[in-house]
Amino acid sequence: MIPKLIPTPVMERVRAVLFHRRVVFGIPFLWLMLFFLLPFALVLKISFSSAVMAIPPYEPVVRWVDDTFSIVLNLGNYLFLASDSLYIAAYWGSVKTAFLATVFCLLIGYPMAYAMARAPRHWQLVFLLMVMLPSWTSFLIRVYAWMGILGNQGLLNSLLLWLGVISEPLRMLNTNFAVVLGIVYAYLPFMVLPIYTNLVKLDVRLLEAASDLGCRSLTTFWRITLPLSKAGIIAGAMLVFIPAVGEFVIPELLGGPDTLMIGKVLWEEFFNNRDWPVASALAIVMLALLLIPIVFFHRFQAREMEKHG
Amino acid sequence: MGKLSFSKAMLVLGLLFLYLPMMVLVVYSFNASRLVSVWAGFSTHWYGELFRDQQILSAVWMSLRIAFYSASMAVCLGTLCAFVMTRFRGMRGRTLLSSMITAPLVMPEVITGLSLLLLFVAMAQLIGWPVDRGMATIWIAHTTFCSAYVAVVVSSRLREVDRSVEEAAMDLGCTPLKTFFVITLPVIAPALVSGWLLAFTLSLDDLVIASFVSGPGATTLPMVVFSSVRMGVSPKINALATIIILAVSIVAFIAWYWMRRAEKRRMGPR
């Protein structure tokens, strides 16, 4: 209780503020509990069910049998995933492809961000918009553009044939190479932006001090710039790696029959085989794989926000 | 100096890498031939085909409506979340809310789509809604993941706002609600606009989540484009891509002009 000593108008104000805070907090909290957290609980529940020919196509996990409440947890889906080498290969393929793409994004994106951060102020704005603009157009269409370039009768093969570099078309579309290229192309802006925002805040005096003390520019880069931009590199790498593991559109359009990625397998289990419980189990295992990087990313973001907040 | 020119060269090459494939689409949208390898002369034939395609046109209208509603709702929810994240230090549940709001930023789309579909199916069994999945379910799904982006944009602006003006207004007897509308809202308005635009483009672009939560009644533009490009290169899609690239470039140019003018006004002599 608020002591009587506090005059009434002040108490009213305190109450009003508390009421507003509760509303401001409550609305998004309820929305996210209902449309974010609860759905995950359902995925977990249905991953313990088994598929039946019904609507919806799975057996209830919680039910009343002979007046007793029973929960039937069926581990069959998980055992099935572990026993079939296809799924293990798909998880491994996803992680490998996403990792390769992240490395290439970093190798291309870091120098780009570095040059942007060193450019004159009015040019920085132009470059920033130029890097962001492709991600505002359609993701699907940007991936599709590579189908016309990499195809057997595509632009690149025609060009190479015309130049006489090759005598017959190279198979580039529907390969793992095309998938990595597609991911690098689609996710490059997400690598450049966090590194740029980090590098632009870097104190130039540190670099001047280093060079005044006789440090060579390459040494300055390795010992000062790179360690200080660690936060940007981690944020960028997570923003590329985590969604790339679950990517569906790129392996579907650019990948071939030997491209095994878990997002595509999950899609096929769900839409083609209509096996919702196995699709749910696939999602739970993918989430468990990604949990460490996701938690890592969150911790990092939270710490960065506290620092600048 | 050597390293400096290396990074500049990488910037130019990187931008070329980002833009050349899109330029190829623009050029080939004017190709009279159906094949990519053959240039059969300049033609606007495919644009005519595009505008006669009823399926694409109705999908465009559907996508625009969903994107408009999703972006508007996402700005409301995202702004509330941004307030909780930046202003309500030490409130119980704040950490849970902020991790729930930022999780969709990195969550693979197939997981989000699957989980929301399972929710809608369970809801239909339990309370009889939604009977048919379609616009409403896509709207809910898009609002949820777009709010995350709005929250990030708005909270970074809210952190920069000088709170003393708000406190002064409150001390002079303004209610919290009035303080928000008179003081805070005008200051964060640019962030709300850019958050809305970001949410609008994200919703317009989403294929995976919409495919999971949509029903037979609602087909969005990415769904039509996807089923078409799965079969191979299509000149009609090149024409559509050109229109999208043009529209985004115009908006980006206006944004650039506006930001540049604002910056000049801030820098220039008074």
Image: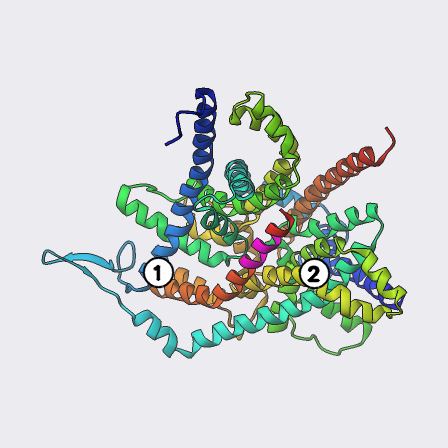
Farthest residue toward the left? A66
Q: Nearer the viewer's eye, disc 2 or disc 1?
A: 1
Callout 2 amino acid:
Val
Farthest residue toward the front? A5
Mark number for residue A165? none
Q: Chain of mark 2?
A: B
Q: Position of residue B94 (x, y in %)?
A: 47, 46
Q: State yes or no: discs 2 and 1 in contact (Cβ < 8 Å).
A: no
Q: Which residues are magenta?
A: A299-305
Q: Quadrant of residue A169?
A: bottom right
Q: Quadrant of residue A72?
A: bottom left
Front residue of A221 and A254: A221
Q: Kindly tell me whether residue B230 is visible in this rendering.
A: no
Front residue of A141 and B151: B151
Q: Quadrant of residue B189?
A: top right
Residue at 27%, 68% in the rendered image: A74
Predominant secondary structure, magenta span? helix
Mark number for residue A44? 1
The answer to whether residue A77 is above or below residue B81 is: below
Q: Quadrant of the N terminus of chain B?
A: bottom right
Q: Chain of mark 1?
A: A
The residue that mark 2 highlights is: B36
Tell me if A300 is positioned left or right of A155 in this view: left
Q: Position of residue A123 (x, y in %)?
A: 82, 48
Q: Secondary structure at mark 2?
A: loop
The answer to whether residue A16 is above or below residue B102 is: above
Q: Quadrant of the C terminus of chain B?
A: top right
Judge whether residue A304 is colored magenta.
yes
Residue at 9%, 58% in the rendered image: A66
Crowding near the residue tagged with mark 1, few <14, some 14–19, many ≥20 C-alpha atoms within 10 Å? some
Q: Position of residue B194 (x, y in %)?
A: 64, 39
